[in-house]
Image (cartoon, rainbow, N blue to C red):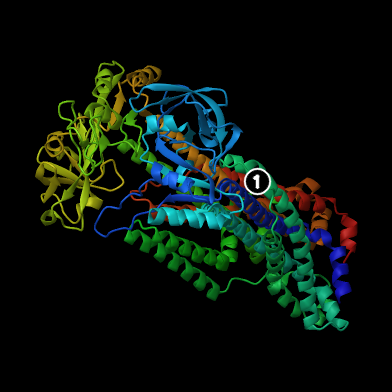
Amino acid sequence: MLRTTLAGLRLHKSRYVTTVLAILLGVMFISGTMVFADTLKASYEESVMGSATGVDAIATPAEPEYVEGEDPAEAVAFDEEQLERVRDLPEVASADGMLEGRAVLLDAEGRAVGFMPPAAVSLGDASRFSAKEGRLPEADDEIALATSTASSTGFEVGDTVTMLDADQEKLDFTLTGLVNFGVDPNFSMAGATVLTENVVREIAAPQGYSEIDVVAAEGTDDETVAKAVEEELGATAEVATGTEFGEELAEGVGAQTEVLRIALLLFGVIAMFVAAIVIYNTFAILIAQRQRELALLRCVGAKRGQVFRSVLTESFVVGMVSSILGVLAGIGIGMAGARFAGPLMGTDVTASVVIGPGAVLSGLLLGTLMTVFSALVPAMRATRVAPLAALRTSATASGLEKGTGWVRVVFGLLLFAVSAGLIGLTRMTGPDPAGLFIVTGAALIAFVGVVVLGPLLVRGIVRLVGVPLRRVGVPSMLAVDNSVRNPRRAATAMIALTVGATLITGYSVVSASLESTLTKTLDEQFPVDYQISPQFNPDELTVGQEETETTEEGVEEGVEGPVEGTEEGAVEGTEVAVEDEEPLAELATIPSRVREDLEKESTVSKVFGVRSDSAEVAEEGVGGPLESMPVSTYVGADMGTDLTADMVEGELSDLEPGRVVLSEGYAGGMGVGDTLTLVTPEGDLELEIAAIAEDMQSLFGATVSEEDFVRAFPERTQDDTLMIRGAEGADSAELREAVYSAVDDHPTLQVDSVAEMKNQFSQMMDIAFYTIAAMLGLAIIIAVFGISNTMALSVLERTRESALLRALGLARGQLRRMLSIEAVLLCLIGAGIGIALGVVFGWAAAAAVLPNMVFAAPAGQIAVFIAVSVLAGLLAAVLPARRAAGTSITGALASE
C-alpha cells in the first residue's frame, strides 16, 4: 500500500505544486521570523554584554525606599570621597565614576537637538563604554557622540560640534569619536555626548557620579571585587558584576525582541491558517476525483484503515517536503531581514546569524502537522467510498455537491446575530481597550458564519452578478453556470481569500479612522500654523519646584525655593532656588521678546500663548477622588473662536473671570453651575464651572481666564507655549522665515509646523499600513494559489466536458475566457465578502479604542484591492486555462 501511495504521488505530483507553494510560504514566514528575532536578540545581547563585561563590577546609587503618602525620593549620586574609597580597596585595580547630566547640543543649523537634551557624560579609563569609531575625548575642546546621536544629526568624526553651557553660551568642540551605548535606557532615548569631566561639571552641573565602574586587581575574580565594593559602599549602592549587570539589561532587550517575535508570528499563523484551508480544499477535491481509484483499491482487498493511512501518508510526504523547503527559504529570509531590516530599526546587527533548533523544528512540525491535520477529513471521506464505485463510468466530485440545508442556514444566521449583538455591546459600553477583544471574538464568530453559509452566499451572489454576465456572451454564460455548479467547492476556495481581504480591509479602516481622528484632534489642539515651545530638560530647575542651587556666597542644606534671588537678596551661607530668576524663566518658558517680534510681522495674524501649572482641589468642592489638577490659560486667545473643543455641556465661549472649563475626566461628577475650589499658593480660588469639554480634546484639566490664572500663579508671567496663525493669503515661505527669525537668538526653543506634524503623522501611518499590508499579503498570495489549484483540479475533472464544448464550436480563446471569468468571479466573491466584513469590524475595532472616533473608509485602497482581486483571478486562471485549451479534443473524448 505504501508503494502504491508513493507511486501515485510521483505520477500526479503536478497536482500538488500549488499546495507545496502554500505550505512553503507559510513555513518560510514562521522560520524566517524565528531566525530574524533570534539574530536580533543575540546582537542586542552581544552589544549589551560586550559593554557591561568590559569591567568587573558596576555600582549604581541605591533607590530609596518608597514611603506611602510621600513623593518618591531620588537616588543620591556617589561623591568623590566614595569613589576614592573604592579605588583604595585592595581588590580593585582601577575605578572611575561616570558623571551624568544633560546639556544642549546644536545641530548643523544651530537649533537644539531633540525634544529633550542628550545626556552629557564623562567616561574614564575604567568604563564599560569605549569608542566604536575614533577615540574618546582627551582635551576639554573635544567631544564624542553616541552613534545614534551622530546618525540623527549627520555629524562625523572630525566635524565641529557646538553645545550650550549653563549660561546659554556656545562652546565649540572637535568630534573625536563615536560610542555605541547600545540599548541602555539612560542613553537610548535622547542620545548622549561624551566630554571630559571638567566640561561635564561646567555645562551639566551633575550632582555626583551616577555610576562607578571597577576593574578587579590581578588574581581577583569579579564576584569577589563586587562583594568588596558592596561592603565598602553599604546601603547607598547596588553593586553587580559586569555580567550580572549586562544580563539585567539584556532581559529588557529580550522582552522587546519577544514582542517583535510574537507580532511577526501572528502574521505567520494567519498565513498558515490560510494555507490549511488551501490544503483541505486540495485534498477534498482530489479524494472526490479519485473515487474510482480508491474504490478499485477496495475491490482488490484494501481495507478502510489502509485507505485512510494512504491519504495521510500522502499528506505527510507533501507536508514534510514542503516544510523542509520552507525552512531553508525561511533561513534565507531571516538572514536578509537581519541584514537589511535591522538598520531600518536603528539597530546594527553585529552578531552572526542565529539558526536555532526552534526555528527549524517549529517550521518542520508546524508545516507537516498542519498538512496532515488538514487532510484528516478528506481521508475519512476516502474510507467511505464503496467498492462498487469502481464500476462507474466517470469520476465525479459528488461528495462536494451537497446542497445547503435549512439547519445550516439557521445556524449561520444565528452566528451573524450573535456577532452583531457583541458589536452592539461594545457600542453601548463606549471606548474601552477590552472592547477590542470583544470585537475580535465577534469577527471570529461572523467568519464561522461565512464558512457555514458559504455555499448559499456563492450561489446567491453569482446569480445576482450573473444576470448581466449572461448577456455578454457564451463564455460568460458558461462561467456563471460553472460557478454555481459546485457551490461548496467554490465557497471553500474563496474562504481563504476572504480571510486575507477581511484583515487587510479591517486594518485599512482602522488606520484611516485613526488618521482622521488624530488629524481632527490636531486641528482642534493646534488651530494654528506654528507652535513654539522650550526644549524639555528634566535637569533644569523650574519656578515653584523645591530644589536648591548654590550661590556664590555659600551653601546650607534644607532651604526651600523658590527665592527671588538678587545680589542683595542672596543670604550668605544660604542655598536658594536660583540666583537670578530671568535666565531660569528663559529656559523654562518663551521669552516675551519672541512674542513681541512675531506680533510685528505682517505675515502673522494671531499669536496666543499657553501657561500651565497645577493646583490641589479642595475636598468639599470635589465630586470624585481628585487630588491635584492641571490648570491652564490661553493668553490672547478668543475662546470658542481661536480655540475650539467638543463640549459635553456648556459653551467654551462662556469662559470669563470667575469661571472655569473642565475636561470630562477631571470633572469628577460635577456639572455646569457647580463650584470648583482650587488650592493655590496664593490661597483658595473659587470658580463656577462654565462648561465640560470632552476628553482627548484641546483642553485638559481646568482652563481658566488669564485674570484668574494671574491671581492663582502670579509668578507665571511668561508663556510655556506660543501658537502662531499666519495671515490670510500670506506666503508660506515668508511665514516660516518670520517664525524662525523670531527664535534665532533662542536655539533651545522648538518650532513645530502643524502642517509638517500632520504630514509626518500621515507618512508614519502610511508606512505602518503598507508594512502590515505586505505581511498580510502573504496570506493573499497563498489564497490565490489555492484558487489556482482549485481551478486546475476543476479543469482536470472537466476534461471531457471541455473537449465536448470545443467539439461543439467553442474556440480556444473562448474556453480560456470562460475559465478566467470563473476564476475572477471566485476572487471577487471572496474579496467582496472580506471587504464587507473588514469595513464593519474595522469600524467596530476603531470605535472600541478611539474616543470621538471619526470613521473613514479608504475608498482608494479598497478600489485598489478589488482591482488586485480581479488581477489575482486572471493570474490564477492562466495555467489551468492554457491546459484546458491545449487538450486534444479527440484524445479527451476517447479517454473515458
Q: Residue at 17%, 49% (x, y): give it.
A: 616
Please tell me in which quadrant of the rendered image residue 460 appears.
Answer: bottom right
| Amino acid carrying mark 1 in the image | Ala
The picture places residue 270, in percent across and down from the top left corner, at 60, 58
Q: Residue at 44%, 44% (x, y): give it.
A: 84
Q: Examine the rendering and report whether any part of residue 834 can be seen.
A: no
Please tell me in which quadrant of the rendered image residue 448 appears.
Answer: bottom right
> Looking at the image, which is closer to me, 625 or 428?
625
> Looking at the image, which is closer to me, 691 or 561?
561
Q: Name the side, left or right, on which 894 lies relative to 854.
A: right
Q: Name the side, left or right, on which 816 lies relative to 611.
A: right
Q: Which image quarter is the C terminus in?
A: bottom right
Q: Examine the rendering and report whether any part of residue 140 can be seen.
A: yes
Secondary-structure class at tag 1: helix
The picture places residue 772, in percent across and down from the top left corner, at 56, 48
Q: Which image quarter is the N terminus in?
A: bottom right
Local packing at callout 1 (Cα closer than 10 Å; few below 14, some 14-19, many 20+) is many
The residue identified by callout 1 is: 338
The picture places residue 803, in percent across and down from the top left corner, at 83, 57
Q: Is residue 820 above or below residue 427?
A: above
Q: Residue at 14%, 44% (x, y): give it.
A: 680
Q: Is residue 279 above or below residue 208?
A: below
Q: Is residue 808 above or below residue 390?
A: above
Q: Is residue 103 above or below residue 651?
A: above
Q: Name the side, left or right, on which 789 lies relative to 780.
A: right
